[in-house]
Image (cartoon, rainbow, N blue to C red):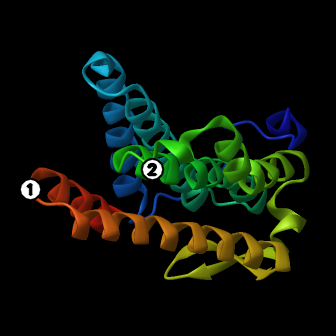
Amino acid sequence: SFLGGTGLSPISMQWQPTPYTLPLLVASFASFVFAVYALWNRARGERRLVWSFVAVTVASGLWSLAYAAQLSAATLAGTLLWNRLVWIGAAALAVAWPAFVFASVDWTAWLRPTRIAVLALVPATVGGAVLLAGPDPLFYGSPSLAEANGYQVLEFLPTPALGGFIAYTYAVNLCTFGVLGAAALANDGLFRRQAALLLIAG
């Protein structure tokens, strides 16, 4: 496994709690609580909406938890190790969020397995590449730790792959914002408020 390949264990890592550690842990805990709540009450909601919401919360929870560990790791190896899981959460969210938006506005045509597979192609490729090769050298050129405000933080040269994936996720996000904005304008009452709140949350 990629954990074993680093030669590290959580016990041997050095840690540096940062001002961001606790808020990220709280965000992660809240995300997992929302996921459990949705699963517990899944019979009350539309199936695709519930499962896409669970996917969003689990991906967000993983992202927040791994990012808290990444920022708190005080060695380069530990930082890059946890950063792999950050990218897994980010890749999963790049699929889960648009699926949740489409389910929320009842765009059922976009929830077909073939279209979800196309939507997942880039994130799944990124996630697999990060697990197999690591974020260095896929996304980070010459990664190192540098001191900033008394903490060790990751510094690197961004690669074209990093720029490409960021551009992809921003394009997907802009599309989902457009969908939510159109839904808010085209409807009224509760549905409009829900679409507007999702747009703000997004």
Image point (67%, 52%), residue name: 119
Label 1: state its secondary structure: helix
In the rendered structure, the answer to whether residue 4 lies left or right of residue 57 reads right
**Kind of residue sitting beneath label 2:** Phe
Badge 1: residue crowd in 10 Å (few <14, some 14–19, many ≥20):
few
Residue depicted at 35% across the width and 46% down the height = 104
- Quarter holding the C terminus is bottom left
- Tag of residue 16: none
CA gap, disc 2 to disc 1? 19 Å
Q: Is residue 194 left or right of residue 33?
A: left
Residue 98 versus residue 80: which sits nearer the camera? 98
Between 26 and 87, the one nearer to me in the picture:
87
Please name the amino acid that badge 1 sits on: Gly
- Residue 74, image x, y percentages: 64, 60
The answer to whether residue 135 is above or below residue 102 is: below
Q: How many marks?
A: 2
* Quadrant placement of the N terminus: top right
Q: Residues within 10 Å of mark 2 (few under 14, many from 20)?
A: many
Residue at figure coordinates x 59%, y 74% from the top left: 171
Tell me which residue sits at (53%, 59%) in the image: 16
Residue 92 on image: x %, y %: 61, 47
- SS at mark 2 in the image: helix
Residue with the most extreme left position = 189
- In the shown orientation, is residue 77 left or right of residue 110? right
Q: Which residue is mark 2?
A: 102
Residue 79 higher or lower than 55, as above or below: below
Q: Earlier in the sequence, mark 2 or mark 1?
A: 2
Disc number placed over residue 189 in the picture, else none: 1
Q: Is residue 159 visible?
A: no
Q: Quadrant of residue 177?
A: bottom left
**Residue 36 at x, y percent in the picture:** 35, 25
Q: Is residue 16 left or right of residue 156?
A: left
